[in-house]
């Protein structure tokens, strides 16, 4: 290994932080543009779900979890209700 | 003023979401540039409570009445308009330093803009930072928007947010007319840092925001010098930032001007090219 390789190596190792910035921005911008007001309905959805389910089953309000997970290809709406012990 | 050669007045908002990216510098440069090109231009400071356009334009000691005085009928528009000392077709309407942004009433602002449209070709609205009433008011009546963005994550995200607001909360959007024409202006750009991978490139920012590029203003010592002196940087014809702004004005007016100051400057170019100081 010559002394020049040392310099070259050092130059290559400088991290490209601009590329990281770009990737992070592309993700948040795509998400914020993807749907109108993306998460605004979540609270209301949760309340209405609780209301509907309580018509049939006695549930604890705190035992209902609604989560929306999104990645580039698809969104997953996850509903998790713990029913009380029978 | 004679109305014989009067073109249809157009309202330009200079906006960004994030503060400190160069909105007021751009408003001052752009309005001076339009005046220099022969257009009757007025620039309005919408940053009520934190006025600064007067300082950047160098007319702070001539402010008697302001925008809010006119809105509330305490002064006439002609009393509040300050004539620029360099161009006699350029006027400044300063913001109030003592009131708050809630004093900006949508209908009253609309009436003032309509009145200004009779006398001016271009009405440049210098928006405050943020997305609250002052910023919303500055963009409400706009026909064009210059979105000032630094090549930096928080500024780019805020610009995206402002683009969303421009397309949904302006008068044009509310009335279902053609949307505001948006332009991206990248400021404080450092080609050498981009070359090192330390800064988002013009292409990166443009890809993320997908708005037509009006121009790129390089990071330049000339900008601080200009604000120190109260002379819009566009008037410093030897400076890179001044030349870049002049290109932007010409592009805005429809001329095809190639981008400059976007590539790393070599040693010899630095010797013979535009001064960055």
Image (cartoon, coloured by chain):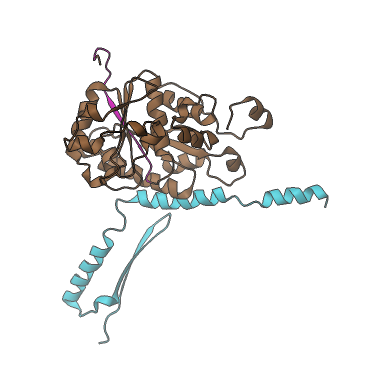
Chain colours: A cyan, B brown
Quarter where residue A74 is shown: bottom left
| Magenta residues (range) | B3-17
**Residue situated in front as seen by the camera: A73 or B103:** B103
Task: Decide whether residue B110 is among the magenta residues.
Answer: no
Q: Would residue B188 be found to the left or right of residue A4 on screen? A: left
Please name the residue shown 40% across and 29% down the image: B30
Q: Give x and y (percent) for residue B241.
A: 51, 31
Q: Give x and y (percent) for residue B193.
A: 59, 43
Residue B60 visible, this angle: yes
Q: Is residue B18 above or below residue B116?
A: below
Q: Give x and y (percent) for residue B143.
A: 29, 31
State the residue lying farthest toward the top: B4
Task: Decide whether residue B9 is among the magenta residues.
Answer: yes
Please name the residue shown 23% across and 38% down the image: B68
**Residue situated in front as seen by the camera: B180 or B62:** B62
Q: Is residue A64 above or below residue B70?
A: below
Total label count? 0
Q: Give x and y (percent) for residue B63.
A: 31, 33
Q: Is residue B185 above or below residue B20?
A: above
State the residue lying farthest toward the right: A2
Helix, strand or loop for the magenta stretch, by majority: loop
Image quadrant holding the C terminus of chain B, namely top right
Please name the residue shown 21% across and 44% down the image: B103
**Residue situated in front as seen by the camera: B72 or A5:** B72
Residue B183 visible, this angle: no
Image quadrant holding the N terminus of chain B, namely top left
């Amino acid at each position: 290994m010559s002394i020049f390789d040392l310099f070259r190596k050092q130059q290559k190792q400088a991290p490209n932080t601009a590329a990281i910035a770009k990737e992070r921005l592309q993700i948040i911008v795509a998400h914020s543009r993807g749907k109108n007001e993306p998460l605004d309905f979540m609270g209301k959805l949760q309340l209405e779900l609780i209301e509907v389910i309580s018509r049939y089953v006695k549930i604890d309000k705190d035992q209902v979890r609604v989560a929306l997970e999104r990645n580039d290809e698809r969104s997953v709406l996850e509903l998790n209700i713990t029913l009380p012990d029978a | 003023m004679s109305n014989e050669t009067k073109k249809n007045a157009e309202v330009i908002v200079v906006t960004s979401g994030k503060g400190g990216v160069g909105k007021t510098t751009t408003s001052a440069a752009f309005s001076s540039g339009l005046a220099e090109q022969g257009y009757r231009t007025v620039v309005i400071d919408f940053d009520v409570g934190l006025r600064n356009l007067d300082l950047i334009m160098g007319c702070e000691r001539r402010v008697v009445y302001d925008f809010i005085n006119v809105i509330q009928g305490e002064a006439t528009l002609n009393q509040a308009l300050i004539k620029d000392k360099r161009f006699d077709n350029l006027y400044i309407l300063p913001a109030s330093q003592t009131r708050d942004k809630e004093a900006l009433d949508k209908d009253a602002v609309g009436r003032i803009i309509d009145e200004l449209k009779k006398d001016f070709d271009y009405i440049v609205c210098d928006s405050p930072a943020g997305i609250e009433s002052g910023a919303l008011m500055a963009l409400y009546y706009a026909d064009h928007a210059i979105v000032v963005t630094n090549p930096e994550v928080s500024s780019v995200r805020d610009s995206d947010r402002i683009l969303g607001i421009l397309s949904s909360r302006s008068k044009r959007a509310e009335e279902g007319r053609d949307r505001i024409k948006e332009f991206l202006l990248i400021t404080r750009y450092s080609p050498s840092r981009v070359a090192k991978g330390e800064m988002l490139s013009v292409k990166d920012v443009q890809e993320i925001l997908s708005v037509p590029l009006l121009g790129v203003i390089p990071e330049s010592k000339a900008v601080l010098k200009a604000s120190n002196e109260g002379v819009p940087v566009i008037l410093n014809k030897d400076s890179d930032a001044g030349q870049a702004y002049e290109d932007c004005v010409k592009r805005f007016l429809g001329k095809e001007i190639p981008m400059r100051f976007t590539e790393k400057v070599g040693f010899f170019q630095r010797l013979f090219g535009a001064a960055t100081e």
